[in-house]
Amino acid sequence: MEDRIKIIKDSIPLIDLRAPIEFAKGAFPASINIPILNNRQRAQVGIKYKNEGGYAAEKLGFYLLKNERENKVALWKRFIGKNPTTHLYCSRGGKRSQFAKSWLSDNGISVPVIDGGYKALRNTVIEILNSVNNDKKSWVILAGRTGTGKTAIIKNLNSGIDLENLAKHKGSAFGGSLNGQPTTINFENNLASEYIKHTGNILFLEDESVRIGNLIIPNVWYKKMNESKIVIIELSLEERIKNIAQEYVYDPLKNGLSKKNLNSLLQSSLFKIRRRLGLMLYNDISLKIKKILIDSHKSSHGEWIEDLLVNYYDPMYDYQLDLKKDRCLLKSNKTEVINFLIQVEKNQSL
């Protein structure tokens, strides 16, 4: 257990020997997939094992790899040469790890194999995530209406963990990324890695709903977040509109997204909340976005953003904040909130 925690904490480079289809479901931040068997070969060996047993499956595996061994070893050696502390793992630390270790040993290279493989590492992740029940850290949750810049503040605190960055999503219906989100397993693996590296007695997190896009915050984490002290940042409507326009409109355009594609992205996000908005407001906002981005209408983006904030986000968020007011340490403007958090981080106590 301690060895596996160290591997995760120190971001030890890992060669994942599993097939690409296994790797895609979940892996570790410091791992690279250089498989022994590809997806098709793995399926063939699996069928052979099921029908004829382990010896027949192993024999088939050797046959499938008879002309690939040198190439596999060369790829592993190249990675190990750049990452001397590399460890190997397969699904459970079985045959694939043994073969890889043996083949490398034949080439004069000794590489540790993770006992229990990916399954053991994954179990360690679950134990790390569940350990928050017993940690001695004080959690502080940064809350505030949409557009107050909470994420940027968390990013600038050494004691913060940015859940939205790990989830590759900004948290709201409009927070999706063109590149999509990680799998649930990868989100949890990355979160555990961040947490085990976290030092100090204070942990800052942004106020989130249980779901960030398609991903769900682990139950034990969400429960503790909802029992922790909060700090609420207040910002004027005008400033929040400006922040949202910058983040969701001007930055994507600056980074090369076309107006047509941005319109499609915003319209898709808007469609997700159409029932809550009501048909009239939904159609009105949809038309305003389209006119500005597609029809070159000169209206400000501030109008439709204000419609969303005033009629949808603010009432919903204000209701949630009211339920949390008994846990509030401070409710103030951006400058005072940042100064307070910096002082808490410096003292490592509330």
Image (cartoon, rainbow, N blue to C red):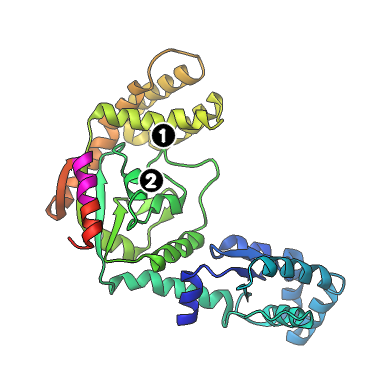
Q: Is residue 226 visible?
A: no
Q: CA distance from mark 1 to mark 2?
A: 13 Å
Instruction: Identify whether 124 is placed above or below 233.
Output: below
Q: Could you say which disc has been placed on residue 247 in the image?
A: 1
Instruction: Identify whether 81 is placed above or below 303.
Output: below
In the rendered image, which residue does mark 2 sit on? 171
Residue 27 lies in magenta, yes or no?
A: no
Q: Position of residue 93 (x, y in %)?
A: 62, 80
| Extreme residue toward the bottom, this view | 55
Q: Earlier in the sequence, mark 1 or mark 2?
A: 2
Instruction: Identify whether 188 is placed above or below 205.
Output: below
Indicate the amino acid at tag 1: Glu
Q: Position of residue 291 (x, y in %)?
A: 46, 17
Q: Main secondary structure of the magenta part?
A: helix
Between 53 and 234, the residue placed more toward the observer is 234
Between 350 and 21, the residue placed more toward the observer is 350
